[in-house]
Amino acid sequence: MMLKNSKISILIFTSILIGIYICIVIKKYTVLYIVPSISFEINPFEIFSLILNIFLAYYIAKTLTKEHDARKSEKELLINYFLEYKVDFTNKVSELSEQENFDTVISNAKFKILRSKIYSIIGLAKESNLIEVSEPILNEITENISEIWELFTETPKIASSKSSLAVKADIEKIRLEKLSKIELSNIKLEKLIFQLVLKINNK
């Protein structure tokens, strides 16, 4: 914010200098002069300089306002993409967690879509220059999604009714452990996206 205010101050100061310079040039190279019979003193060059400076300041302020509004809209749109993705991801994980078998064609297909979607959103973020290309959070987000996907593929399916009680107990224990890790990774993803949103807002 301080940098933006400095840029505005520099532009306004520059516009004033340009106005003064133009007035000097006009005064030096034109035949404009003050009629001595005028009973009150009005310097036309000062008036011209004032009008020109006001016009330049207004034009620069208006241009900067438009750029700021466009940038703000771009930020809001990108932030919404990330937040909507987080909701979609959480819903998909919750839906897949209710299946008897986590490692299925459907699960893999949905995770591939989710991974492609986050790569696309991250690509937009980099292209818009609203986030540094080397921002480590971006890699952490994709790694976290891959980690959740791996946890799904490593989770055993529910034991069949023919399995012994001991086998059922062991499989249920493993499934609960995996589900717990999936939930923790999902919470971590939410935190990472929140941190990224803050960075985009502060850009």
Image: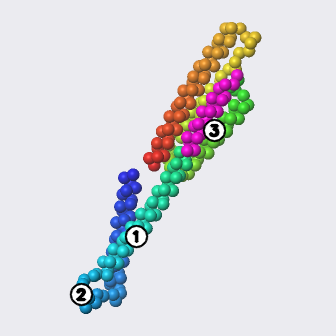
Dots 3, 1 in contact, CB < 8 A: no
Q: Residue at x 67, y 37 (%)?
A: 112
Q: Residue at x 72, y 32 (%)?
A: 106
Q: Where, by quadrant of the figure, is residue 22 drawn?
A: bottom left
In front: mark 3 or mark 2? 2
Residue closer to the observer: 74 or 166? 74
Q: Earlier in the sequence, mark 3 or mark 1?
A: 1
Q: Which residue in the protein does label 1 denote? A: 56
User: What type is the residue that disc 2 sits on?
Assistant: Ser
Q: Earlier in the sequence, mark 1 or mark 2?
A: 2
Residue 70 inside the magenta-drawn segment = no
Q: CA distance from mark 3 to mark 2?
A: 80 Å
Counting other residues with Cα less than 10 Å from the Cα at mark 1, is it few (<14), some (14-19), or many (20 or more)?
some
Q: Which residue in the protein does label 3 denote? A: 115
Residue 94 inside the magenta-drawn segment = yes
Count of all numbered marks drawn on residues in the image:
3
- Examine the rendered structure and indicate whether residue 114 appears above or below residue 153: below
Q: Residue at x 40, y 70 (%)?
A: 56
Residue closer to the observer: 179 or 69? 69
Which portion, as a residue range, is magenta? 80-100
Residue sticking out furthest to the right: 162
Q: CA distance from mark 3 to mark 1?
A: 49 Å
User: What type is the residue that disc 3 sits on?
Assistant: Arg
- Examine the rendered structure and indicate whether residue 12 appears above or below residue 121: below
Q: Which residue in the protein does label 2 denote? A: 39
Q: Main secondary structure of the magenta part?
A: helix
In front: mark 3 or mark 1? 1
